[in-house]
Image (tube, rainbow, N blue to C red):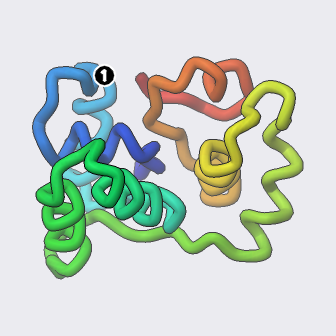
């Protein structure tokens, strides 16, 4: 089964960070191992560009992500932010998850009917299947 990765999850995965939980790492590797797509929302790509510009993460994060996205053998895919995701945002309570990028990522997981790999405790309070 595939998965949707939150922004921090894809960064930690690409950098082999110990911050990524063992369960999350195993789920990502298992999805890739069976050829399932692993998605990141287009908003995550935008967030990563922003974080690089702000100096909060190294440019290598964006470079590694772009290389993985261009690699035809990679299971990593971009999920668009489209009208379907916009409609699904209503299913992610703003009272629980106030940050719009987080709501978009969560709505993407709902639309794709896939679990979301995230350590975000607010998203854990929703009805979305979480891997962490």
> Does dot 1 land on a helix, a strand or a loop?
helix
* Place of residue 5 in the rendered image (x, y in percent of width and height, measured from the top left): 42, 46
* Place of residue 42 in the rendered image (x, y in percent of width and height, measured from the top left): 50, 67
**Residue sitting at x 15%, y 30%:** 17
Establish if 44 lies above or below 57. below
Instruction: Please state which of residues 32 and 51 is positioned toward the viewer in this rendering.
Output: 51
Left or right: where 59 falls relative to 100: left
Left or right: where 96 falls relative to 51: right
**Residue sitting at x 11%, y 36%:** 16
| Circle 1 crowding by C-alpha within 10 Å: few under 14, some 14–19, many from 20 | few
The residue under label 1 is 23
**Which quadrant: the C terminus?**
top left
* Place of residue 91 in the rendered image (x, y in percent of width and height, measured from the top left): 85, 44
The answer to whether residue 102 is seen in the rendering is yes
Left or right: where 101 falls relative to 96: left
Query: In which quarter of the view is residue 92 placed?
Result: top right
* Place of residue 103 in the rendered image (x, y in percent of width and height, measured from the top left): 69, 45
Instruction: Please state which of residues 32 and 107 is positioned toward the viewer in this rendering.
Output: 107
**Residue sitting at x 51%, y 39%:** 116
Establish if 11 lies above or below 82. above
**Residue sitting at x 44%, y 36%:** 117
């Amino acid at each position: 089964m595939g998965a949707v990765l939150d922004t921090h999850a894809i960064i930690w995965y690409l950098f082999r960070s110990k911050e990524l939980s063992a369960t999350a790492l195993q789920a990502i590797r298992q999805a890739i191992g069976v050829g399932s797509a692993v998605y990141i929302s287009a908003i995550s790509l935008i967030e990563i560009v922003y974080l690089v510009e702000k100096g909060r993460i190294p440019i290598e994060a964006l470079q590694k992500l772009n290389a993985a996205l261009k690699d035809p053998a990679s299971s990593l895919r971009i999920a668009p932010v489209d009208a379907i995701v916009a409609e699904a945002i209503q299913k992610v309570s703003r009272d629980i998850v106030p940050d719009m990028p987080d709501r978009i990522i969560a709505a993407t997981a709902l639309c794709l009917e896939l679990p979301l790999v995230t350590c975000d405790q607010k998203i854990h309070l929703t009805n979305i299947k979480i891997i962490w």
